[in-house]
Amino acid sequence: MVLIVMSTGFLLILMGLYGSLTNRNILRMIVSFTVTNTGVNLVLISVGYMPGRTAPILDETVAVSEVAQRIIDPVPQALVLTAIVIGVGVTALMLAYAYRLYETKGTLDISQFTELKW
Amino acid sequence: MIKRFFVLALLFAMGLLFTDLLLSYTPDTELNSTALYYANHTAKDLGAANIVTAIIVSYRGLDTLGEVTVLFLSAAILVLVLPKGWRRGKRKPRILPSTGELLGTGSHLLVPLILLLGVYLFVNGHLTPGGGFQGGAIIASAALLLLLTNPLQPFSRHLFSVVESIAGLCFVVIGLLGIVYAGGFLDNRLLPIGQLGELFSAGTMPILYSLIGLKVGAEFSSMLINLSETKDS
């Protein structure tokens, strides 16, 4: 179970990197970056998983006394919650910059932006 | 061609590294010491049923403050970067085709329910899976639905900035009160902890998470509105 999620995450990272390195269109690169982001989140979440345990929420099924034996690691989940929110902010920024780039050059092809090329 | 070869070689190397990591990975059978501390102390000390919420709002509340600041910064930079055209009357308003019965009626039905779900999620953040960030994102999805129904929807920009500022200010003030009257910055034991599992429990945690929810919802909504209000959209 854990290996499935983790390998999916690694696969998504590789797919996202491939997409962002080979595509010339800025919008496609942004989509690839979000795919990479999702992959990293999946890997992080799967690291916190432990077989046979349940979510870190105390209710009728998880008593306070046996909580250390019943729950999975809550720290990666808190980390991923943070990472998802920051990912949204980063994506919004990338889209805004892509809009401005399109406005100045009239194209989204990254090979047309040669000002910083050396 | 040679460039693609380099890309593939890089990806192959990374894939080898990942496979190595994957094959050598064995899941833990015991919680590590940090997680064990959180597991054993959350219910007793803070009275929160959701341990992830306890970590985000209380134990690592300072990080959450930083995270909310990052979100605020990206929303602010979005306003700075995107040009505003027709809002200031430089361009005459666009004539849009009618939305259609289904989307119009559907959004009237769904928007209050979506808002209610968002509020429910962040008010119950210390008890159920959910919380301020998720609830805020759901509230922003209501704004997105309104924008889809009518892209020229007049949103009160002032209201969003007021909600956002007041929520952020209250968050910091409650955190500072925690230094004076409880154990430290953002300590939730400012109010009585109460019974585990009740809505009014876990001290200031539901209040703080609701503030985060309002702030995140206002920020995401204003981001969406700014993106839809660019000059040529």
Image: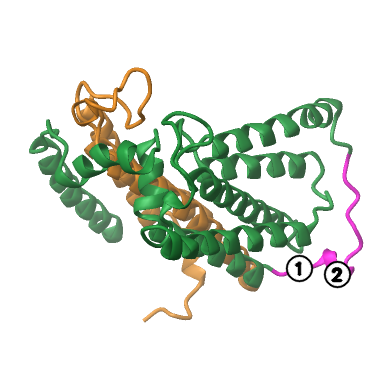
Chain colours: A orange, B green
Instruction: Give how far across and how far down residue B170 sits, in percent.
Output: 59, 60
Instruction: Give how far across and how far down residue A86 sits, in percent.
Output: 45, 55
Tell whether label 1 touches label 2 (CB within 8 Å): yes
Report the disc number at residue B88. Answer: 2
Task: Please state if B217 lies on the left or on the right of A76 as rendered.
Answer: right
Secondary structure type for disc 1 = loop
Please report the bounds of the magenta region as a residue range. Answer: B83-97
Instruction: Give how far across and how far down residue B76 sits, in percent.
Output: 61, 68
Task: Please state if B105 lies on the left or on the right of A77 as rendered.
Answer: right
Q: CA distance from mark 2 to mark 1?
A: 7 Å
Question: Is B137 above or below relative to B99?
Answer: below
Q: Nearer the viewer, residue B87 or B49?
A: B49
Q: Nearer the viewer, residue A27 or A53?
A: A53
Q: Is residue A107 visible?
A: no
Q: Amino acid at mark 2?
A: Arg
Instruction: Give how far across and how far down residue B77 sits, in percent.
Output: 59, 69
Q: Is residue B139 magenta?
A: no
Which chain is mark 2 on?
Answer: B
Q: Nearer the viewer, residue B133 or B224?
A: B133
Task: Respond whether the residues carrying marks 2 and 1 are from the same subunit.
Answer: yes
Prevailing secondary structure class for the magenta stretch in the rendered image? loop
The quarter in which the C terminus of chain B is drawn is bottom right
Secondary structure type for disc 2 = helix
The structure residue drawn at horizontal position 52% and vertical position 41%, both measured from the top left corner, is B134
Which chain is mark 1 on?
Answer: B
For the image, the number of numbered tags is 2
The structure residue drawn at horizontal position 37% and vertical position 54%, both measured from the top left corner, is A22
Report the disc number at residue B84. Answer: 1
Q: Nearer the viewer, residue A56 or A82?
A: A56
Question: Is B161 above or below relative to B18?
Answer: below
